[in-house]
Image (cartoon, helix red, strand yellow):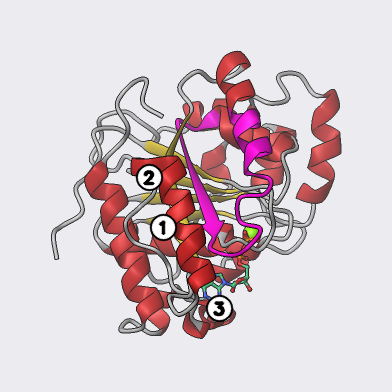
Amino acid sequence: GDPMPRPASTRVMVVANQKGGVGKTTTTVNLGAALAQHGLRVLLIDLDPQGNASTAMSVEHHRGVASSYDVLVEEVPLVDVVQPHHEIPGLYVVPATIDLAGAEIELVSLPAREQRLRQALAAHPLVDGDGEDRFDYVLVDCPPSLGLLTLNALVAGAEMLIPIQAEYYALEGLGQLLETVEMVRTHLNPRLTVSTILLTMFDARTNLAAGVASEVREHFGDQVLRTAIPRSVRVSEAPSYGQSVMAYDPGSPGALSYLEAAREVALRGAPTGGAR
Ligand code: ADP
Ligand code: MG
């Protein structure tokens, strides 16, 4: 297929949806792996206290490991908590430990409480800048809530990727999510755009999934990637082997579609100013 071009500057993409189980973590991990496999430099930040992305990337994330908690609460520089992926060159992970569960509350009384991830990213030498080794993508995996952790991500990023599970209640809660985006745009981060919507766990055999998909496409138009991720057991098995689905079963429909989704993201490039 086509190569995946490097963006002109670091693209910070926040993978968010306050609904749990819609494929945020699965998307962050596999998109990140797919981009890195194609020669792009990727930093994946786990902002969910559950640490599912850290598990899937098989980076250490037991209590005491330097993590996103230390960055947000203790102002430890991001460079000091980054771990390289064990297999894929160019892929780096900031793990989440269970400490992060307390951060939601601890952050409330800290100065610039919703700016902390943005500040940490701005201070990282490989975010933006002109060096060959600059990160092409920073992908942030958010928890299933609209609290201060997700807010930190939305303030830090320019792009938001919303995974939508192609099922009956898919659009429920989306209004609240988009209101939050508007609030962030107005008060905290005018650059924020919903650049990418990805249909996940799509079951092509059901009319329901097809109906939800066309409703989502009607509503969001070009923001929706052409590629939908099919429901596939290989996708759900891969994390327990600490692998991306591309490494676990390269020929599987899940692997091929995440690769295709990554290609679309790379080829479409960053949105130009004002788009949303
Ligand atoms: P979130 O991070 O939004 O809570 P996850 O990515 O953890 O969602 O996905 C929720 C569950 O669905 C996980 O068990 C995951 O393995 C499974 N899953 C995600 N995408 C797929 C898919 N395309 N096919 C089958 N199972 C999937
Ligand atoms: Mg998750």
Q: Of 181 and 93, which appears nearest the observer? A: 181
In percent of width and height, residue 145 lies at 73, 45
Element carrying mark 3: helix
Q: Which of marks 2 and 1 is nearer the N terminus?
A: 1
Residue 195 in which image quadrant: top left
Q: What residue type is labelled 3?
A: Ser
- Number of other residues with Cα within 10 Å of mark 1, as a class: few under 14, some 14 to 19, many 20 or more: many
Residue located 73% across and 54% down the image: 49
**Label 1: which residue?**
32
Label 3 vs label 2, nearer the camera: 3
Q: Quadrant of the N terminus?
A: bottom left
Is 62 left, or right, of 232 in this rendering? right
Is residue 135 visible in the rendered image? The answer is no
- The image shows residue 199 at horizontal and vertical percentages of 46, 59
The image quarter containing residue 6 is top left
User: Which x, y percent locates residue 117?
Assistant: 60, 32
Viewed as shown, does residue 265 lie left or right of 74? left
Q: Give the range drawn in magenta.
A: 156-181
Q: In which quarter of the image is ligand 2?
A: bottom right
Residue under the point 86% across and 37% down: 105
Q: Which of 117 and 27 is in front in this view?
A: 27
Q: Which residue was labeled with disc 2?
A: 137
Q: What residue type is labelled 2?
A: Tyr
Residue tagged 3: 236
Q: Are the residues at dot 2 and dot 1 in contact (C-beta closer than 8 Å)?
A: yes
Taking the spot 41% from the left edge, 57% from the top edge, the residue there is 32
* Residue at mark 3 to residue at mark 2: CA–CA distance: 24 Å
